[in-house]
Amino acid sequence: MNILFFGPNGSGKGTQGTILKDKYDCAHIESGGIFRENIKGGTELGKKAKEYIDRGDLVPDEITIPMVLDRLKQDDCKGGWLLDGFPRNKVQAEKLHASLEEAGMNLNYVIEILLDRQIAKNRIMGRRLCENNPNHPNNIFIDAIKPDGDKCRVCGGALSARDDDQDEDAIDKRHSIYYDTDTGTLASAYYFKDLAAKDDTVKYIELAGEKDVKAVTDELVSKL
């Protein structure tokens, strides 16, 4: 199955993507990773992208979308893929859809994790990292994984917060792009939502993101 995945920072999108990857043996493709792979590999598209990035400019869609398509054509995607982090606006959604059709790639599912903006922000700022294992779940704003004071709830190790998780301005900037329903990421999600309403080969799935990880996973799997 081929999937587009939408959700704001703090929604648990990455966690659910990893779960789907393992359960359905599909490739989990993150847009940032595509840029890094092309630049590190010295591909022609990577070289062009690097010129824009080095200048502090956005990489144009004419470079980004071919990169995405090239990645989706690789061998590990033959059994299905899950694309996370792209498209980020309505124009990119339209161009990606047209490019997928031209390449003969079917889009089967579009998943959106719904989450209130303030809750998403709290989840980011509430994340705490265990000195022994950063994958131990600790978040001061989520009751199910709230740590024991300043100690890891799993092993008792000391906890710390990432600097970027405490940067409210950066969080607000990312969320302003995501929650923009006119030109932002949600506008791109809604493009595919409208498409799914007219095309029964594409299914649009909405998930209640305020639930715990297992509950979100159970709801997602039941709808796939």
Image: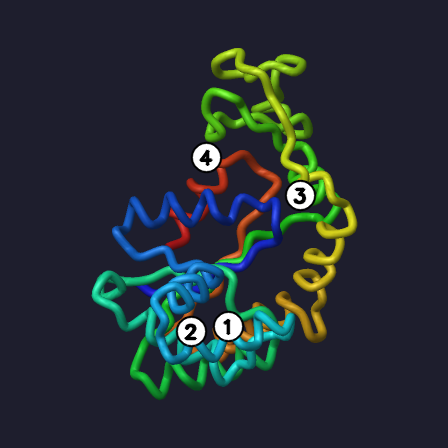
Q: CA distance from mark 2 to mark 1?
A: 6 Å
Residue 146: x and y in percent read 62, 22
- Residue drawn at 68 percent across, 57 percent down: 174
User: Which residue is denoted by mark 4 in the rendering?
Assistant: 214
- Residue drawn at 39 percent across, 59 percent down: 29
Residue 209: x and y in percent read 58, 45
- Work out whether residue 213 or residue 88 is closer to the camera in this orientation and state it: 88
Q: Crowdedness of circle 1 by 10 Å Cα count: few (<14), some, many (20+)?
A: many
- Residue drawn at 53 percent across, 44 percent down: 12
Nearer-N-terminus badge (3/1): 1
Pointers 3 and 1 in contact (CB under 8 A)?
A: no
Pointers 2 and 4 in contact (CB under 8 A)?
A: no
Mark 2 vs mark 4, foreground winner is: 2
Q: CA distance from mark 2 to mark 3?
A: 27 Å
- Residue drawn at 63 percent across, 74 percent down: 55
Mark number, residue 50:
1
User: Which residue is denoted by mark 2 in the rendering?
Assistant: 46
Is 14 situated left or right of 103 in this image? right
- Work out whether residue 76 or residue 209 is closer to the camera in this orientation and state it: 76
